[in-house]
């Protein structure tokens, strides 16, 4: 049986190929070369993204937090500029003075009591966690469960100390900041950077545009505007949601006679910054505190949080999403898992706004589906 032969090209069929043969051969190779080039670009993109997430992820999260602060300050100052006819720099100064003054007044009036209650909450959570751990550790299945839970979360499993929550927050390259100032210093850096970004957003936006090829700058400018509008809408909607949940939780716990109602309400409101899973994070401290008060108080806390989350999920959230940014729940939870795995705790926290921005950008870059093929 004769051996199989590969398909010959125009160059192999002619001992002296002409210019037309060379052009035909190049045309035949163009399609596989284009596919190979596309695969190489995708591989490089994935490799670069992984390296950035592994070594510079915390820096990106600090940058995202600074942009978040800048968008908040810029949005409030723009509203003042629009209605009060003030210059932008003066409106931003007014916003900073009002926020600083309000924070100082709040600390002066409720600061000592809030710190006291926060310490009591910390002690109560530590005590209840230890009691639950000891109770589970006395049983076979409880001991088996605790052996698979890291000791950071109250389990028995020992984990390496080189990668903690604090190092997730500050990151490998920001250890200089974390070792000198700690998390408080990092928050100060975020706030100061946000002020500078809000004071001169055009300067930094134009600097980013200069790094982009000239032919793509117009599209990049449109995408940047879409990202800013999407982030502003998400912040407004989620901020309103956090405020309502925090107030309802604090008032409900106070009416129920639960201790530490103020810090628990603040925790519930702040935890609601993380959609869906944040509700569970805000419920756990109140549930642990209620265990020390008795089964009646525990039942009240469970019903209270269930009622608030029912109101938030079926009444408040649809109203907010109608005027802000609508995101599918499954996609939001999956994005929190992915960003948390890649970027740590801060990636989990900022997954929702980053996903909202990516959805808005992809919606702009991709064509709409035809009515003939849509499900």
Image (cartoon, rainbow, N blue to C red):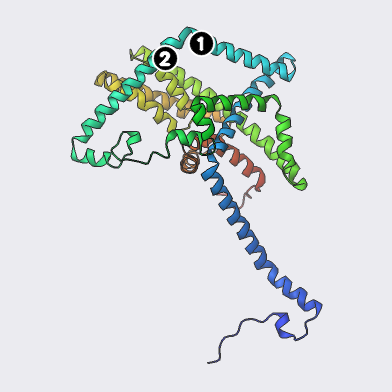
Residue 79 spot, x, y in % from top left: 68, 19
In the rendered view, does 237 fall on the left or right side of 310?
Answer: right
Q: Residue under label 2, please give it.
A: 115
In the rendered view, does 280 fall on the left or right side of 211?
Answer: left
* Quarter location, residue 14: bottom right
Above or below: residue 78 compared with residue 156:
above
Q: Residue at x 46, y 43 (%)?
A: 341
Query: Which of the marked residues, 2 or 1, is nearer the chain's N terminus?
Result: 1
* Quarter location, residue 160: top left
Say whether marks 2 and 1 touch (CB < 8 Å). no
Residue 245 visible at all: yes
Q: Report crowding for label 2: few under 14, some 14 to 19, many 20 or more residues within 10 A (C-alpha).
A: few
Q: Report crowding for label 1: few under 14, some 14 to 19, many 20 or more residues within 10 A (C-alpha).
A: few
Q: Residue at x 60, y 38 (%)?
A: 357
The residue closer to the viewer here, 340 or 361, is 340
Q: Secondary structure at mark 1?
A: helix
- Furthest residue toward top: 109
Above or below: residue 219 compared with residue 76:
below
Q: Residue under label 1, please give it.
A: 106
Q: Which mark is residue 351?
A: none
Foreground disc of the pair 2, 1: 2
Q: Secondary structure at mark 2?
A: helix
Residue 76 spot, x, y in % from top left: 64, 20
Residue 236 visible at all: no
In the rendered view, does 360 fall on the left or right side of 291?
Answer: right
In the rendered view, does 143 fall on the left or right side of 258?
Answer: left
The residue closer to the viewer here, 237 or 77, is 77
The residue closer to the viewer here, 176 or 189, is 176
């Amino acid at each position: 049986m004769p051996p199989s032969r590969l398909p010959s090209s125009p160059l192999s069929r002619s001992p002296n190929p002409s210019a037309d043969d060379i052009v035909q051969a190049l045309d035949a190779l163009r399609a596989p070369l284009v596919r190979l080039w596309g695969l190489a670009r995708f591989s490089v993109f994935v490799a670069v993204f992984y390296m950035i997430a592994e070594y510079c992820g915390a820096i990106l999260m600090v940058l995202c937090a600074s942009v978040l602060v800048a968008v908040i300050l810029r949005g409030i100052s723009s509203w003042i500029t629009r209605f009060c006819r003030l210059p932008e720099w003066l409106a931003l100064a007014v916003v900073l003075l009002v926020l600083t003054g309000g924070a100082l007044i709040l600390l002066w009036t409720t600061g000592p009591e809030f710190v006291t209650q926060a310490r009591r909450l910390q002690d109560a959570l530590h005590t209840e966690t230890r009691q639950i751990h000891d109770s589970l550790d006395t049983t076979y299945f409880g001991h088996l469960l605790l052996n698979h839970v890291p000791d950071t979360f109250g389990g028995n499993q020992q984990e390496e100390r080189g990668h903690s929550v604090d190092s997730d927050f500050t990151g490998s390259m920001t250890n200089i900041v974390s070792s000198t100032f700690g998390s408080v210093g990092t928050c100060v850096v975020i706030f100061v950077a946000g002020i500078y970004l809000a004071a001169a957003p055009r300067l930094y936006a134009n600097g980013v545009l200069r790094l982009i090829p000239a032919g793509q700058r117009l599209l990049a400018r449109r995408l940047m505007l879409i990202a800013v509008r999407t982030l502003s809408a998400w912040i407004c909607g989620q901020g309103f949601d956090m405020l309502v949940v925090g107030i309802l939780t604090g008032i409900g716990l106070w009416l129920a006679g639960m201790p530490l109602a103020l810090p628990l309400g603040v925790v519930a409101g702040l935890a609601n910054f993380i959609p869906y899973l944040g509700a569970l994070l805000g419920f756990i401290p109140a549930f642990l505190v209620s265990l020390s008060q008795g089964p009646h108080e525990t039942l009240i806390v469970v019903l209270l949080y269930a009622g608030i989350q029912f109101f938030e999920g079926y009444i408040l959230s649809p109203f907010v999403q109608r005027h802000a940014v609508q995101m599918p729940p499954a996609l939001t939870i999956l994005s929190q898992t992915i960003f948390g795995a890649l970027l740590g705790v801060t990636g989990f926290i900022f997954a929702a706004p980053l996903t909202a921005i990516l959805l808005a950008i992809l919606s702009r870059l991709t064509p709409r589906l035809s009515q003939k093929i849509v499900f």
